[in-house]
Amino acid sequence: MMTNLLEKSKAVLFNFLGKSETLSDEEQLNDIDTTRFVVLDTETTGFDYTNDRILCIGAIVLQNNTIPIHDSFEVFIQQEHYDKATAKIHGILKEFILDRPNELEALQQFLAFLGDSIIIAHHTIFDVTMINNALDRNGLPKLTNKTLDTAVLYKKTLLGSHLLERKDNYSLDELADKFDISQKDRHTAMGDAYITAIAFLKILNKLRGKKGRLSLKQLFK
């Protein structure tokens, strides 16, 4: 199985270097329904891009407005750094799972799953930066995938009225409350990825509005 994952990761890296034979950017942006999204979340030892490390990556596929249960990814990474304070939030103990890949192996598995899909996350810059820093540490090229942020997209659904006070930032908890999404597995990578995926679908419905039409290109404006 590891051999297959390594072969897939090589193919992914080949694509990242500009030799992809997949759909062009223009073709990819035309059809929002058939596009493969990967909704992801990372649990980390903290929020310092330089010194903190990824503990777990959770990701699920979203395509054709559905979340196929069988098409998901979760990896717990060997811990070089441990922080008791943040462990109380994410619940990942240092010896919680004994058989964990090292950072390089985990990244190779993740890249094979991700492919050239569009990344969706809540506050995408944090997750992508943490992953890119890990890639850089391991001599791998940074992600070139297009990204969408549910925190940004949610603000597009709000009425443009001077009577409505719009916040600069909306948390994932606020989106879950707004869309009545269960927070049972909040602060786990897979749980937060699932909440983000449901929130994204709800946001799409609002943006489509009465016309029922929305292009992927419009999401990037």
Image (tube, grey):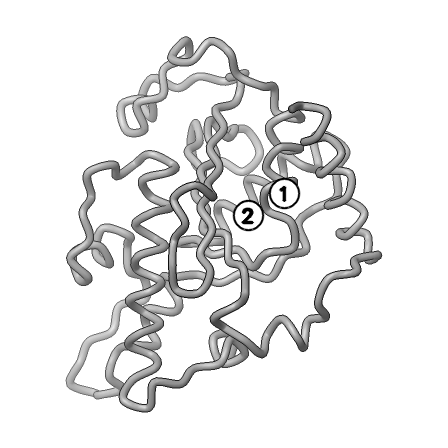
Res. 28 image quadrant: bottom right
Callout 1 secondary element:
helix
Residue for point 30% across, 50% down: 195
Residue located beneath label 2 in the image = 128
Residue at image coords 22%, 88%? 161
Q: Which image quadrant: the N terminus?
A: top right
| Mark 1 surroundings within 10 Å by alpha-carbon count, few (fewer than 14), some (14 through 19), many (20 or more) | some
Quadrant hosting residue 213: bottom left
Q: Amino acid at mark 2?
A: Val
* Picture layout, residue 81 above or below residue 206: above
Residue 193, compared with residue 179, is above or below; it is: above
Q: Are marks 2 and 1 in contact (CB under 8 Å)?
A: yes
Residue 179 falls in which quadrant of the image?
bottom left
**Amino acid type, callout 1:** Asn
* Percent of width and height locating residue 128: 55, 48
Left or right: where 57 falls relative to 104: left
Percent x, y of residue 57: 48, 35
26 lies left or right of 170: right
The residue indicated by pointer 1 is 132
